[in-house]
Image: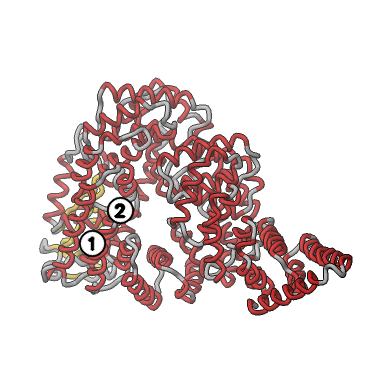
């Protein structure tokens, strides 16, 4: 095509020279020729502008290839992308446009005439595939012009760079600097919010604050029905991991007005952004649920249904979930690889038990394993394991793929993730290459990654049959490396906010046992960086670790009180929690509590999220503080109805946590403030909770021990003691399953025997080294009122059970219901520690 164009250009040049030479003789003829040529060109331009669809544009281009100029290319490209922009996302046909032969013709013409193209066309042409040979030329040309770009054109250019994953490139760095210099000149919310997302990976704290102020101003003046602008602002805040509550509230208010006009895709995106930021807004969630219910019958294709399923199932009741699961089963064959993975993750999140649907989705994933990347394979493996899916062939393939990704990975965030997921797969042997790869990557990892690696090491140790018979040097050396690198990272830390970001998602006990002291020393060294913005984050960490550092707490109290006017009301609970939980008090803390109570009481009329008000009231009750306005609001009929509606749409863990705090608050008010005349309405809840807790513990014991038949509940012993849970371990601490129900009996000779359900008598002789274990759940009645000291009757029962041959383990209610144990994983780790560590 290029040779043809060169030939055409040369030919046209010769013709024009001939005409110019004959100009003196034929002036009128030349004038008529030029007028005719311009008229032809105008006709082509007019034909392009008159097009209303891509096919019409391509038809004009195909018929006039020899006549196309830069002006025609500009117009055609601009029109093609306008057609795409005017369609909903799901109806766009970008791939078809890119692959059309006449679009390739436009690309060739553009590549030869880049320098003659206008700024807008240069940027719009960048929407071709990143591997296209034209892109490099276009990027370089746009880079050379970007200083003169209009801000609207610059925003489009930044989107093109983002589409090519050039988030941290020098070009994006220059765009960030241009935004900083010209921020005051931007008066279009769409342009600003687009640029905010593009430069979010490079903004400094100062530019971040300036962008937030500018965005807040433009939101007030823009059309409130342009919902994409607040959505992009929320995305920007998510990208920079910054919870600016006032701006979030303003964005949420605009988005809430637009819910009746939103489609499934936009609702799904917004709910996902809010969820990733842990921003809970009852009003928007309820409105979104109602809108999604309206869209159920129209979401019949695979793409729209997947988005609807992922957005609605976590919010829906049992009947709606079942209906959506049945619909997913019917549509399963139409799902592509990414859609099937999205549904699988949602099934795991909601603890789905629809085995037919799980099998169907797993079969689709099995067929498409080669298209997934490391993160996707990790999510898939974890979800299938947590759903208890059984397919050794699939798990064998997943293990091989994970190992291949681990060996090839160069990213510090991938290696800990891959090693943690690999450790979840059943295996008696840990490849030395895995340990070596993890060990090599440790110095580059974050503190959160260290926590993930230690979880993997703990699993490898438990599953390694050689661990107790040889020196586990590979594990010990890796743990020592983690500790050394963690200490170095904490000692060299210079920014408190960066460290708090790494500590946000730390789980497991290793970090707290190994590096907690060094972490607190680091906090004290950087204590001057404690600000009103990071006090809630720091407060959550201290509460989670139960570390009582008085100098740090006093500094937090001073900073929070002095900046009370800046702290959003939704942050008061997190701010007050460590002082209440850790029982730290001082004059400044008293002032802080009074200020928070005053702020809370001033906005009780409707601004407070119901669950947050319950949690705040509970934190106040811990320090013997019961503001009458707050208590009467929480226990009003209207508030409790609103709370019930919100709880229905909450994740299970948060739902139970809020219900427990409401129960504890109800108990505290009944005991300490009888004058409020609040009734005790949690008796049935507590009884159900006790029964459910026993069932839950037995189920988790089955998982910990290797099968539901490895543990029994409510076992009756001789002399009619009842043991909450019972199991048997061999000398290697492996559970011995029960073959059939049996009871411990005393024969005529006074000897202990086990009698099976069939009446057959069995000897009680256990295998050498084996032991019978009794686990008893101890409620508040088992302890003295003013301490955690067990009563005499509990001690006597323990002695008697030991005489009967049991090893007795106690599960105190204050440990099982503590804030540290609030998830399935932490409860399982607690049981493992009881069964495998305390007994040893």
Q: How many marks?
A: 2
Q: Is residue 829 above or below residue 528?
A: below
Q: As drawn, which residue projects farthest toward the front?
A: 24
Q: Position of residue 156 (x, y in %)?
A: 58, 54
Q: Is 533 in front, or is 618? A: 533
Marks 1/2: CA distance? 16 Å
Residue located beneath label 2 in the image? 448
Residue located beneath label 1 in the image? 458
Residue displayed at 82% across by 64% down: 43
Q: Is 722 in front, or is 81? A: 81
As drawn, the label of residue 418 is none
In the image, is 655 to the left or to the right of 454?
right
Q: Position of residue 63 (x, y in %)?
A: 77, 73
In the image, is 448 to the left or to the right of 761?
right
Residue displayed at 43% across by 51% down: 201
Q: Is 131 in front, or is 174? A: 174
Q: Is 835 in front, or is 426? A: 426
Residue displayed at 22% across by 44% down: 519
């Amino acid at each position: 095509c290029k040779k043809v164009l060169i030939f055409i250009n040369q030919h046209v040049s010769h013709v024009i020279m001939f005409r110019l030479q004959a100009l003196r003789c034929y002036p009128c003829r030349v004038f008529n020729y030029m007028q005719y040529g311009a008229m032809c060109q105008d006709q082509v331009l007019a034909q392009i502008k008159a097009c209303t669809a891509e096919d019409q544009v391509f038809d004009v281009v195909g018929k006039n290839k020899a006549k196309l100029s830069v002006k025609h290319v500009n117009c055609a490209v601009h029109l093609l992308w306008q057609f795409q922009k005017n369609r909903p996302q799901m109806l766009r046909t970008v791939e078809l446009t890119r692959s059309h032969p006449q679009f390739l013709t436009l690309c060739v013409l553009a590549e030869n005439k880049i320098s003659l193209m206008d700024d807008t066309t240069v940027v719009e042409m960048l929407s071709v595939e990143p591997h296209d040979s034209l892109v490099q030329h276009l990027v370089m040309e746009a880079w050379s012009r970007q200083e003169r770009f209009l801000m609207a054109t610059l925003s489009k250019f930044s989107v093109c760079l983002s589409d090519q994953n050039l988030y941290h490139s020098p070009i994006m760095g220059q765009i960030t600097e241009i935004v900083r210099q010209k921020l005051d000149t931007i008066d279009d919310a769409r342009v600003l919010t687009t640029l905010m997302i593009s430069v979010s990976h490079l903004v400094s704290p100062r530019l971040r604050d300036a962008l937030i102020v500018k965005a807040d101003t433009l939101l007030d003046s823009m059309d409130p029905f342009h919902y994409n602008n607040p959505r992009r602002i929320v995305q920007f805040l998510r990208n920079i991991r910054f919870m600016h509550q006032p701006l979030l509230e303003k964005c949420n208010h605009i988005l809430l007005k637009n819910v009746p006009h939103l489609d499934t895709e936009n609702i799904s995106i917004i709910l996902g952004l809010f969820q990733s930021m842990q921003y809970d807004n009852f009003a928007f969630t309820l409105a979104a649920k109602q809108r999604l219910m309206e869209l159920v019958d129209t979401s019949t294709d695979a793409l729209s249904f997947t988005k609807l399923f992922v957005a609605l199932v976590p919010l829906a009741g049992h009947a709606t979930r079942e209906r959506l699961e049945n619909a997913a089963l019917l549509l399963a064959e139409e799902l592509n690889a990414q859609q099937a993975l999205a549904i699988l993750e949602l099934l795991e999140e909601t603890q789905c038990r629809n085995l037919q649907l799980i099998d169907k989705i797993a079969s689709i994933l099995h067929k498409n394993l080669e298209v997934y990347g490391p993160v996707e394979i990790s999510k898939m493996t974890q979800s299938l394991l947590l759903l208890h899916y059984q397919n050794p062939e699939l798990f064998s393939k997943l293990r091989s793929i994970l190992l291949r990704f681990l060996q090839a990975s160069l990213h510090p965030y991938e290696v800990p993730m891959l090693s943690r997921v690999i450790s979840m797969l059943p295996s008696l042997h840990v490849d030395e290459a895995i340990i070596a790869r993890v060990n090599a990557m440790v110095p580059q990892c974050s503190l959160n990654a260290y926590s993930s690696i230690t979880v993997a090491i703990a699993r490898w140790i438990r599953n390694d049959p050689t661990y107790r018979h040889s020196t586990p040097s590979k594990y010990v050396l890796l743990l020592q490396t983690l500790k050394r690198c963690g200490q170095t990272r904490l000692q060299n830390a210079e920014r408190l906010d960066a460290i708090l970001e790494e500590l946000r998602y730390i789980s497991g006990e290793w970090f707290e046992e190994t590096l907690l002291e060094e972490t607190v020393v680091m906090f004290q060294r950087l204590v001057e960086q404690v600000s009103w913005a990071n006090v809630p984050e720091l407060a959550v960490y201290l509460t989670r670790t139960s570390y009582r550092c008085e100098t740090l707490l006093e500094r937090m109290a001073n900073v929070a009180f002095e900046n009370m006017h800046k702290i959003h009301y939704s942050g008061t609970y997190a701010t007050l929690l460590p002082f209440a939980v850790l029982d730290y008090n001082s004059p400044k803390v008293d002032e802080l509590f009074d200020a928070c109570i005053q702020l809370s009481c001033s906005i009780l009329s409707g601004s407070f999220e119901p669950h947050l008000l319950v949690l705040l009231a509970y934190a106040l009750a811990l320090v013997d503080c019961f503001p009458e306005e707050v208590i009467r609001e929480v226990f009003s009929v209207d508030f409790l109805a609103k709370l019930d509606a919100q709880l229905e749409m909450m994740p299970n863990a948060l739902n139970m946590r809020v219900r427990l705090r409401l129960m504890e608050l109800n108990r505290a008010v009944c005991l300490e403030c009888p004058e409020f005349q609040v009734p005790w309405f949690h008796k049935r809840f507590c009884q159900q909770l006790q029964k459910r807790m026993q069932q839950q513990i037995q189920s988790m014991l089955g998982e910990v021990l290797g099968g539901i038949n490895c543990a029994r509940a409510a076992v009756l012993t001789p002399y009619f003691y009842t043991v909450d849970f019972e199991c048997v371990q061999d000398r290697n601490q492996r559970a011995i399953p029960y073959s059939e129900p049996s009871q411990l009996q005393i024969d005529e000779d006074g000897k202990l025997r086990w009698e099976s359900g069939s009446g057959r008598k069995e000897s009680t002789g256990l295998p050498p080294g084996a032991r019978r274990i009794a686990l008893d759940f101890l409620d508040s009645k088992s302890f003295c009122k003013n301490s955690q000291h067990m009563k005499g009757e509990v001690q006597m029962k323990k002695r008697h059970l030991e005489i009967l041959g049991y090893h007795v383990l106690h599960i105190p209610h204050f440990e099982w219901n503590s804030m540290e144990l609030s998830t399935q994983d932490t409860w399982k780790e607690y049981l493992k520690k009881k069964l495998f560590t305390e007994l040893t």
